[in-house]
Image (cartoon, helix red, strand yellow):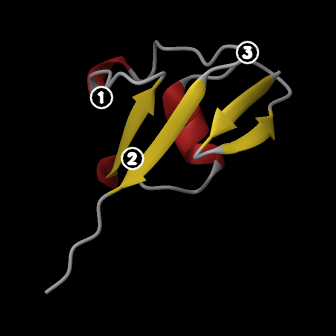
Amino acid sequence: MKIQLNGESVELSDAISLNSLIDRFDMNRETVVVELNGDLPDKSEYDSIVVNEGDRIELIRFVGGG
């Protein structure tokens, strides 16, 4: 299945949850927010939301600085 991830076309072999997608790209779940098709789902739903063909996903990482 093809999705748009951070503006690039990505091929996934199977349906996965948002948390699994975060893990697949070695990102820290605590510092990532997901935008799914223009919406910001609640983090408590990331395990139950399954990525579908054609979804547009942005993985937004918070970075501290000073």
In the displayed image of the protein, which residue is found farthest to the left? 66
- Nearest the eye: 28 or 63: 63
Query: How many C-alpha atoms fall within 10 Å of the one at disc 3: few (<14), some, or many (≥20)?
Result: few
Number of numbered discs: 3
Q: CA distance from mark 1 to mark 3?
A: 21 Å
| Residue wearing tag 2 | 29
**Residue 38: where, in percent of width, then height?**
41, 24
The answer to whether residue 49 is left or right of residue 43 is right
Badge 3 amino acid: Glu
Q: Which mark is residue 19?
A: none
Upstream in sequence: badge 2 or badge 3? 2
Q: Is residue 13 left or right of residue 61?
A: right
Q: Residue at x 26, y 22 (%)?
A: 42
* Dot 2 and dot 1 residues touching (CB under 8 Å): yes
- Residue 40: give x, y in percent of width and height: 31, 26
Calculate the distance from the C-alpha at mark 2 to the C-alpha at mark 3. Answer: 23 Å
Residue 4 relative to residue 50: left or right: right
Q: Which residue is mark 1?
A: 43
Q: Position of residue 30 (x, y in %)?
A: 30, 50
Q: 42 above or below 25? A: above
In this view, 21 is above or below 31: above
The alpha-carbon separation of the residues under discs 2 and 1 comes to 9 Å
Query: Considering the numbered disc 1 on the image, is that residue within a helix, a strand or a loop?
Result: helix
**Classed neighbour count for the residue bearing mark 1: other residues with Cα under 10 Å, few (<14), some (14–19), many (≥20):** some
Q: Nearer the viewer, residue 43 or 65?
A: 65
The mark closer to the camera, 1 or 3, is 3
Kind of residue sitting beneath label 1: Lys
